[in-house]
Image (cartoon, rainbow, N blue to C red):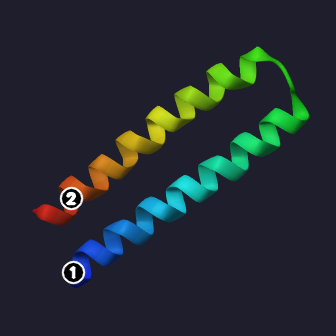
Amino acid sequence: MNLWMIVIASRKLSYRLASQSFFAYLQKKFPNKKTRFISSIFEQITDIQVRKEEHHEKQ
């Protein structure tokens, strides 16, 4: 593994952890079906952000 892969992996992990803790907070605060919908949107945004990071690192 080179350094860039480690950096990308750690960023992915930090994005995922931040988004998961945010989802957990949302679900405690508003325990209904809307939070699942909102959390799925945030998951997609997180994945897009990770892909942007990966693309940026490759260039």
Is 10 placed above or below 53 here?
A: below
- Under circle 1, the secondary element is loop
Q: Along the line of sight, which residue is nearer the eye, 45 or 24? A: 24
Is 33 placed above or below 23 here?
A: above
The numbered mark, 2 or 1, whose residue comes first in the sequence reads: 1
- Under circle 2, the secondary element is helix
**Residue 24 screen position, x and y as percent:** 76, 44
Question: In terms of image quadrants, where is residue 4?
Answer: bottom left
**Left or right: residue 25 compared with residue 49:** right
**Left or right: residue 16 compared with residue 38:** left
> For the N terminus, which image quadrant?
bottom left
Q: Residue at x 19, y 82 (%)?
A: 2
**Left or right: residue 58 compared with residue 7:** left
**Residue 44 screen position, x and y as percent:** 45, 33
Q: CA distance from mark 2 to mark 1?
A: 18 Å
Q: Which mark is residue 56?
A: 2
- For label 1, count other residues whose C-alpha is less than 10 Å away and answer few (under 14), some (14-19) or many (20+): few
